[in-house]
Image (cartoon, helix red, strand yellow):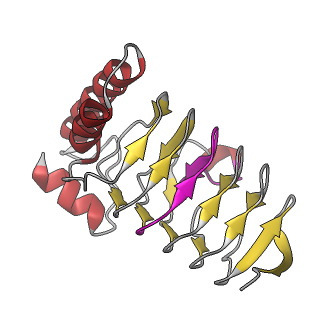
């Protein structure tokens, strides 16, 4: 399985015709079981972190907190720094890679989506992926959606319900659909 994860971390796509696809599919099924365990009974903060370590395949700092439920299908391409907080009901589709740097806050029901499909009907079954990076101390508001290929700048705030389709600079507040800069953050 490490070979599949390493290939994906290096930007390779593993499709149904790839010899390693059964390994990828097995990992997705394992992640779904862990997500079900996370979401369907009470866990202490330490137990939540332990389950997240298994889902994300990384050791987490004791300062990382999450309020389940949480949804993901793969998980192994998510990287999380220190003092990260993820609120109730978030969804991470991470086959393109998700990075949450130190101090990131994610509001309830936010979606971080690195995966998309071509618009052409004949090609729509294919998966297109691009990484998402959320820089230090950024705050993603409730119900916001971060789309593939976006970097959210350091200290930036994404307002509740915003749909982020392009990179967000440092130290700004964005809102709307598609998200646009409203103003700079007060210093």
Which residue is situated farthest in the top direction here? 41
Picture quadrant of residue 74: top left
Using the image as rendered, state which of residue 150 and residue 162 is in the foreground: 162
Q: Does any portion of residue 116 appear in the rendered image?
A: no
Any part of residue 152 in sight: yes
The residue located at (71%, 51%) in the rendering is 144
What residue is rendered at 22% in x and 31% in y? 26
Q: Is residue 164 magenta?
A: no
| Residue drawn at (31%, 63%) of the image | 12
Where does the N terminus fall, quadrant-wise? top left
Residue 119, image x, y percentages: 71, 53
Q: In what quadrant of the picture does the C terminus appear? A: bottom right
Where in the figure is residue 160, as x and y percent of width and height? 77, 51
Compared to 43, does 63 lie above or below? below
**Count of all numbered marks drawn on residues in the image:** 0
Report the residue at 44% width, 63% height from top.
Answer: 100
Give coordinates of residue 57: x percent, y percent. 21, 48
Relative placement, left or right, of 83 versus 91 is left
Dominant SS in magenta: loop
Left or right of residue 91: residue 12:
left
> Residue 186: x, y in percent?
76, 82
- The stretch of residues the image draws in magenta is 101-120
């Amino acid at each position: 399985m490490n070979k599949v994860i390493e290939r994906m971390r290096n930007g390779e796509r593993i499709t149904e015709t790839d010899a390693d696809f059964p390994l990828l599919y097995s990992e997705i099924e394992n992640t779904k079981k862990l997500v079900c365990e996370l979401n369907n009974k009470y866990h202490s903060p330490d137990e939540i972190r332990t389950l997240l370590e298994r889902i994300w395949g990384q050791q987490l700092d004791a300062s990382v907190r999450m309020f389940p439920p949480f949804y993901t299908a793969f998980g192994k391409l998510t990287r999380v720094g220190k003092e990260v907080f993820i609120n109730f009901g978030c969804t991470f589709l991470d086959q393109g890679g998700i990075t949450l740097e130190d101090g990131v806050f994610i509001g309830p029901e936010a979606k971080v989506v690195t995966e998309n499909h071509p618009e052409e009907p004949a090609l729509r079954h294919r998966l297109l992926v691009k990484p998402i990076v959320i820089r230090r101390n950024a705050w993603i508001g409730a119900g916001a959606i971060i789309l593939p290929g976006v970097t959210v700048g350091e200290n930036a705030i994404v307002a509740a319900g915003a749909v982020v389709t392009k990179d967000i600079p440092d130290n700004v507040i964005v809102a709307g659909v598609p998200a646009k800069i409203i103003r700079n953050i007060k210093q």
